[in-house]
């Protein structure tokens, strides 16, 4: 089967972003993809105040979620919808929720971003916790083809997430992201490759790229990496699609010949 990752330069216009996404989903479908990953913040890359006051939706009710369900059904795709701002008990903050929708448009599962990007990079302060409420539960999903583990952007820096009980026997890690240009250039591919090698699985990473609302610049470089750390497809910049077959025979062969996961001595119980 084939997976794809969509790369976008999302703006602060939800309608413009969804129109762009529609064309990219059509492209992924034309490439015979079965499952498509969208980047973090695919529907909105703008000011946090606007996100909280105008964009975030009630769970299972809103134009962004309806769009994803409709397009999954239209194109016959499983869609892993990067992150959508979803209302929670604290109306001043949203959840960054990744939805997994099957080819009939039915919600299969969801994951709320656990690790929030509260850092200083080159003198610029990022504070996701000021407008996002963190999740607390690792999530994996059994698809018709393989088991995938869910994560979002900054989560990729925390390898223990991928060793939790929920992630046992995963075949594919998904990482929708909006990495900054600075941290992306320094760390992005290294982190993704590390997660693939140490977990003996594929990694599918979907990224934002370019300048957003006159402020933030993201790194791009959406890619697919196999269990041996080889990059199968890569898009440095520009709107587009990367895709690759998931070779389950390679997965099994790599794990049989290099059974590092069975050699673990320190267990994580969460």
Image (cartoon, rainbow, N blue to C red):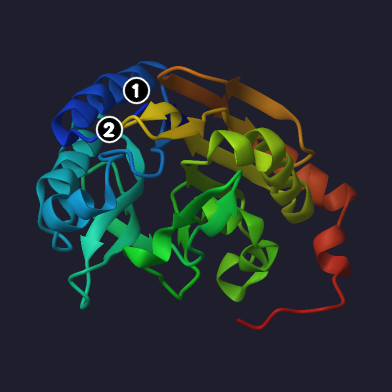
Q: Quadrant of residue 131?
A: bottom left
Residue at 21% across, 69% down: 92
Residue 211 in percent (x, y) is at 41, 27
**Residue appearing at x 13%, y 45% in the figure:** 66
Where residue 227 appears, x then y in whole percent? Answer: 74, 42
Of mark 2 and mark 1, the one earlier in the sequence is 1
**48 shown above or below 192:** below
Judge by depth and name the residue closer to the eye, 37 or 177.
177
Judging by the rendered image, the residue that carries numbered circle 1 is: 29
Badge 1 crowding class, 10 Å Cα cut-off, few under 14, some 14 to 19, many 20 or more, is some
Left or right of residue 241: residue 64: left
Q: Is residue 253 left or right of residue 77?
A: right
Do the residues bearing badges 2 and 1 touch, measured as CB atoms within 8 Å?
yes
Q: Is residue 8 in sight in this rendering?
A: no
Label tally: 2
Residue at 80% x, 63% y is: 261
Residue 225 in percent (x, y) is at: 67, 35
Which residue is identified by label 2?
76
């Amino acid at each position: 089967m084939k997976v794809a990752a969509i790369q976008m330069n999302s703006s602060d216009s939800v309608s413009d972003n969804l129109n762009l996404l529609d064309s990219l989903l059509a492209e992924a479908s034309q490439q015979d993809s079965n499952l498509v990953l969208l980047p973090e913040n695919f529907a909105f890359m703008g000011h946090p105040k606007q996100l909280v006051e105008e964009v975030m939706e009630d769970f299972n009710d809103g134009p962004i979620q309806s769009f994803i369900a409709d397009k999954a059904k239209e194109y016959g795709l499983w869609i892993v919808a990067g992150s959508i701002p979803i209302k929670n008990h604290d109306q001043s903050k949203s959840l960054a929720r990744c939805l997994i929708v099957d080819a009939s448009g039915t919600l299969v599962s969801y994951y709320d971003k656990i690790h929030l990007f509260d850092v200083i990079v080159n003198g610029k302060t990022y504070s996701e916790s000021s407008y996002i409420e963190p999740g607390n539960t690792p999530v994996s999903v059994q698809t018709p083809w393989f088991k995938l583990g869910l994560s979002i952007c900054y989560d990729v820096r925390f390898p223990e997430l991928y060793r939790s009980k929920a992630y046992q026997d995963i075949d594919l890690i998904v990482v929708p992201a909006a990495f900054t240009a600075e941290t992306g250039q320094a760390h992005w591919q290294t982190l993704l490759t590390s997660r693939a090698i140490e977990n003996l699985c594929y990694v599918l990473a979907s990224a934002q790229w370019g300048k957003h609302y006159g402020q933030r610049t993201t790194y791009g470089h959406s890619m697919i990496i196999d269990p041996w750390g080889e990059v199968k497809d890569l898009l440095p910049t520009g709107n587009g699609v990367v895709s690759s077959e998931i070779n389950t025979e390679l997965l099994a062969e790599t794990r049989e010949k290099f059974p590092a996961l069975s050699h673990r001595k320190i267990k994580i119980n969460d």
